[in-house]
Image (cartoon, rainbow, N blue to C red):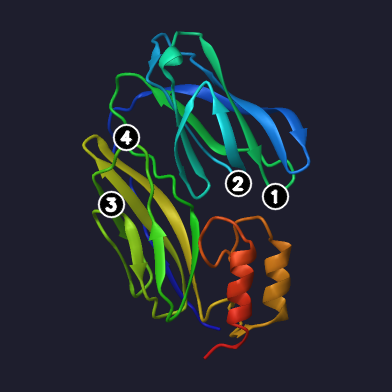
Amino acid sequence: MNRKICTAITCLLSASVSAFGDATFSFTNQWSGGGQGAFRISNGSTQALQGWTLEFDWVGQISNVWNGTLTSHVGNHYTVKNVSYNSAIAPAGIIDVGCVATFATTDPLPTNVIAYGGGGSILPIVSSPGKASAAVGNSFAYQITSSGTPTSFSATGLPDGLSVNADSGIISGVPTTASLCVASIRATNANGTGVKLLTLTVIPCQGDGNSDGRVDGIDLTQLLNQWGQGSAYDLNNDGITNGGDLTLVLQGWGTCQ
């Protein structure tokens, strides 16, 4: 089946940024379906890390945090900020932010872990998923999320039928053509613009993740093989292939119209 291929060329606008610390994660205790661990933030600079923020992506569902305050959880992206007694990390200083989480996959580790703080200007860091799926003729919505308190959003290279709301950062619409697009999504504040590439697959119909014109056993098998992961079968764009996507495949069963 022919599909339109679209791409976007991106550039990153520079600005002064806050101080960054080194951040790592390790489990301290694990059990079936869950575990306890700690994020270690190390300040290797010559200046104190003031008012730090920890950000990361994780399929784990966090139920408890200590030595930090969980301030945001959107999709698989988490943001944790300091508490009053550890707001500054001295040069060569270390703090551990502990947590308890549950997860469906085997011992998943957080990804895209960053820590920053200090007196510098904070450039937006786009944190929303880098992949999404849509279907021709079906309503689509995707939220651009970012750190750094963005004041506007933009996107280029979107599939036909989709557009972005500059104020809310929501990409929405009804795709008109099956396509594979690599779009550039941006978040902007007074200090500059953060950019991320979004691979957006528009399939002929809901559930046809392999774009062969049918929703059938092949799609069902591939969905089950990618259970618990981000994939082309994450049809509801919640960051993970799960029961919600299985329902959509079964609803779209048959030949694409």
Q: Earlier in the sequence, mark 3 or mark 4?
A: 4
Q: Earlier in the sequence, mark 4 or mark 1?
A: 1
Can residue 88 be seen here?
Answer: no
- Above or below for 135 versus 143: below
Q: Earlier in the sequence, mark 4 or mark 2?
A: 2
Does the residue at mark 3 contact the one at mark 4 (Cβ under 8 Å)? Answer: no
Look at 33% across and 28% down and name the residue there. Answer: 17
For numbered disc 1, what is the local secondary structure? loop
Q: Which mark is residue 125?
A: none
Q: Which mark is residue 153?
A: 3
- Quadrant in the picture for residue 247: bottom right
For numbered disc 2, what is the local secondary structure? loop
Q: Which mark is residue 123?
A: 4
Three-letter amino acid code at the position of disc 3: Phe
User: x%, y% of residue 129?
Assistant: 48, 52
Does the residue at mark 3 contact the one at mark 1 (Cβ under 8 Å)? Answer: no
Does the residue at mark 1 contact the one at mark 2 (Cβ under 8 Å)? Answer: yes
Three-letter amino acid code at the position of disc 1: Ala
